[in-house]
């Protein structure tokens, strides 16, 4: 008689278990980044605050007095950092990097380090910040030359499960890893999703690709609404105007600024053509003290060597309103590049000085009126008797302030834990 037995084997994938523990009783914060389900050994353990240029290489048993190792040892694949006397600067996003190695036959070989982000909010704060909705956005503008490659990037403060980009016409693009020698129209650009990096590179762009793009990011360990970032893409020629429309008031000043589209590239010359067809050639040696026609000079802080072609007009006259042309020859180029800028009369800006003057005048009038009314009331009620200054010494009084102090109850908050897959697993996916 045969006995049939069904067996199912669950294979756990290698991943990082990341998170933090607050020890409020001892004013400590513990960050951890442990490897689960692996035969690899840890070679180093590193933590770096997202806003800092340097980090901490943590070794079991060593401490500098404030930062020390947290965990049960490298042999248990545990990487952690303890921060004592926690300050406000210690909150935010931390990046943990774990170096690994494993046996490959009879030799030990290093593997790609594992990385993840740990978002540590202040006590009482939200675990993951989502403050994009409803905020006034100042769109960053990305200039790119037509028929060249375009790279768009955005970043989150925690590990991502996915990200995608929306074209100005509504089309959606999800970046994928490009293999060596593989020809794709677009591909992923950035470190990796675990590090919160999202990016996409397009092989070529055209005029119709200009407009506002939207980057959508989904967190790996928290479900809910995606976070978004927006950017304005301008597909131009080799030289592009920073703003194609500039407002000005008669008698004020205005700056017209053009620069190279694909990063700083030196210019051989820079020139402008006014609406009345007056041509102006200038560089950074032309300043306010030697202005051309006593009112045209190169914008301070700009330089041809960095691809800047900039003109400041001071003062602006009525004849300056209209379409200006900025033109320049990029070094090693044969043909001149140019763009246009519309200088228009900004009625809103013109009203601001008059509005300020009106507010000042109204304030002064109200103060005078209040003084007159106070004097009239005082006159009708009669002068108070004690007009003479007291002969005794001046007495000073101070109000005491009661201070209430509050202390934590000493409880240790529960351990918050998340997980992330390894770089090798992500590449296989």
Image (spheres, rainbow, N blue to C red):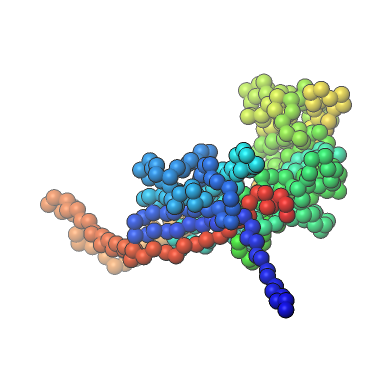
Q: Is residue 65 above or below residue 279?
A: below
| Residue with the most extreme front position | 1
Q: From the viewer's perspective, is residue 142 above or below residue 22?
A: above
Query: At 62% from the left edge and 23% from the top edge, which residue is drawn?
Result: 289
Q: Nearer the viewer, residue 390 or 29?
A: 29
388 relative to 413 in the view: left or right = left
Q: How many marks?
A: 0
Visible in this render: residue 213? no
Q: Is residue 331 left or right of residue 193?
A: right
- Which residue is at the front of the view, 287 or 113? 113
Pinpoint residue 390: horizontal percent, then vertical percent. 15, 53
User: Residue drawn 23% across and 59% down?
Assistant: 400
Residue 202 sits in which quadrant? top right
Q: Is residue 211 above or below residue 331?
A: below
Q: Tell me if residue 305 can be seen.
A: yes
In percent of width and height, residue 301 lies at: 63, 29
View extreme (left): residue: 392
The quadrant of the picture occupied by the C terminus is bottom right
Q: From the viewer's perspective, is 428 left or right of 73?
A: right
x 76%, y 48%: residue: 177
In the image, 226 versus 63, the foreground residue is 63
Indicate the position of residue 195 as horizontal and vertical percent values.
Answer: 62, 49
Report which quarter residue 318 is drawn in: top right
Q: Quadrant of residue 128?
A: bottom right
Residue at position x 66%, y 44% in the image: 191
Instruction: Tell me where residue 234 appears, x and y as whole percent.
Output: 78, 44
């Amino acid at each position: 008689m045969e006995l049939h037995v069904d067996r199912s084997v669950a294979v756990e994938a290698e991943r990082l278990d990341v998170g933090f523990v607050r020890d409020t009783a001892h004013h400590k914060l513990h960050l951890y980044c442990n490897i689960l389900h692996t035969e690899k050994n840890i070679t180093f353990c590193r933590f770096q605050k997202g806003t800092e240029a340097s980090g901490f290489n943590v070794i079991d048993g060593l401490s500098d007095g404030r930062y020390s190792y947290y965990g049960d040892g490298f042999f248990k694949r545990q990487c952690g950092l303890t921060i004592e006397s926690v300050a406000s600067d210690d909150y935010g996003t931390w990046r943990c990097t774990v170096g690994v190695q494993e046996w490959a036959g009879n030799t030990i070989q290093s593997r790609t380090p594992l990385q993840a982000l740990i978002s540590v909010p202040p006590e009482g704060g939200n675990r993951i910040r989502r403050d994009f909705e409803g905020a006034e956005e100042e769109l960053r503008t990305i200039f790119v030359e037509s028929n060249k490659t375009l790279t768009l990037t955005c970043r989150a403060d925690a590990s991502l499960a996915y990200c995608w980009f929306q074209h100005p016409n509504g089309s959606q693009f999800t970046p994928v890893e490009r293999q060596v020698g593989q020809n794709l129209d677009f591909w992923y650009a950035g470190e990796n999703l675990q590090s919160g990096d999202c990016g996409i590179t397009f092989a070529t762009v055209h005029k119709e690709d200009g407009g506002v793009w939207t980057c959508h990011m989904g967190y790996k360990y928290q479900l809910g609404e995606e976070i978004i970032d927006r950017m304005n893409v301008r597909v131009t020629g080799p030289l592009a105007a920073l703003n194609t429309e500039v407002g000005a008031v008669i008698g004020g000043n205005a700056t017209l600024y053009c620069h190279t589209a694909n990063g700083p590239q030196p210019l051989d010359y820079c020139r402008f053509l006014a609406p009345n067809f007056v041509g102006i050639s200038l560089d950074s040696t032309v300043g306010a003290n030697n202005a051309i026609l006593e009112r045209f000079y190169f914008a301070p802080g700009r330089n041809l060597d960095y691809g800047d072609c900039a003109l400041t007009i001071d003062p602006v006259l009525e004849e300056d309103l209209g379409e200006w042309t900025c033109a320049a020859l990029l070094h090693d180029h044969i043909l001149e590049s140019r763009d246009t800028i519309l200088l228009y009369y900004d009625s809103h800006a013109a009203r601001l000085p008059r509005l300020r003057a009106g507010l000042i005048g109204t304030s002064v009038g109200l103060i005078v009126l209040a003084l007159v009314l106070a004097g009239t009331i005082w006159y009708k009620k009669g002068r108070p008797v004690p007009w003479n200054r007291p002969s005794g010494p001046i007495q000073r009084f101070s109000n005491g302030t009661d201070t209430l102090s509050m202390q934590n109850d000493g409880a240790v908050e529960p351990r918050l834990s998340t997980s992330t897959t390894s770089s090798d697993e992500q590449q296989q996916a």
